[in-house]
Amino acid sequence: MERSIYLDQLYFDGFLKFKIDPKNSDLKNINEIIKSIEDGNIKEGFSMETKYDRSADLRPSTIEYDASFSKVCESIGVIDILNEYLKYKTKPRTVQLRAAYEGSSYLSWHRDTHKYKNDATTVGNVPPVFKAIYYPHISNNKPRATLRVSSGSHLRYFNSKIVDLTVPRLMFNKKVDIQESNDTILIFNTGLLHSVLSVKGTPIYRLITSFK
Ligand SMILES: [Fe+2]
C-alpha cells in the first residue's frame, strides 16, 4: 500500500493493519520461540507469569529472552512508518510477550488514555502512545479475532464515560476486528477505543511493543 494512504489511515482510523513480510528472519524466529514456549520449552531462568486472570507475561524480561523481540519492529518497518507519521525518531519503550488463555477475562471497551468528568486524575499517557501488537497465527485452527477497535474513535471524545463507552456498541459505529496473522501487525494510537475479545481454544500470544 502507498505510504500516504498508510499515514492517512493512521490519522483518520487511529490504527493500521500493517503488511509485514512473514519471511522476515526476526518474525520467523519469534514464531518458533512462541511455538516452543507453547509446547512447554522455555529457557532456564524465564517463565510465563500470571498477572491478570488467565493471561501470563514472559518474565523476567521479554527483551532479554531473545534479541529478535526488540529488533523486529525495526526490521519489519514499523519504526520507519511511525517515524514518518510522528516526524521524530521513535524507539521501543517496552516490549512484552503475553499469552491469553481460554476464557480469559474480557476487557471491554476502553481507551488506554482517558479522563472523564468526575475523574480526579488522567489515566494513561498524555499524549497517548502508539503500540504495535503482533498476534502470530501459530495454531492449526482458522485465525481468530482477538481485538476489536472502534475506527476513528481517537478523534472524538465524550466527557461522560457512559456516553463515550456506549457509542462503540452502537450498530452504525464502524468496528474492525483484528485477527491472528503472520503477515500483518497492528499499529495503533492507544487513545482509540478498543475491546479485547475472549479466547476460545488454544492460547493467543501477543507481542506488544509500546513506543516513546
Ligand atoms: Fe488497552
Image: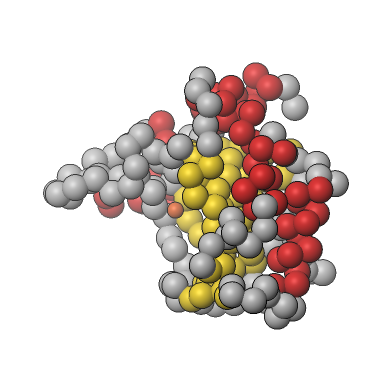
Residue 206, image quadrant = bottom right
Left or right placement of residue 74 versus residue 111 in this view:
right
Q: Is residue 209 left or right of residue 168?
A: right
Describe residue 34's horizontal placement relative to residue 130 as left or right. right
Q: Is residue 77 above or below residue 105?
A: above
Residue at (54, 52) in percent of width and height: 95
Task: Give the x, y percent position of residue 166.
Answer: 36, 51
- Residue lying at 42% horizontally and 55% vertically, measured from the top left: 109
Q: Is residue 26 above or below residue 9?
A: below
Question: Is 114 rendered above or below residue 135?
Answer: above
Residue 144 position within the rendered picture, expressed as x and y whole percent measured from the top left? 69, 62
Q: Position of residue 177 (x, y in %)?
A: 61, 51
Question: Can you say whether 37 is above or below 83 in the image?
Answer: below
Residue at 64%, 66% (x, y): give it: 204
Please indicate, yes or no, whether residue 9 appears anywhere in the rendered image: no
- Please state, as top left, top right, bottom left or bottom right, where the N terminus lies in the image: top right
Q: Is residue 27 left or right of residue 165?
A: right
Residue at 47 percent of width and 67 percent of height = 106
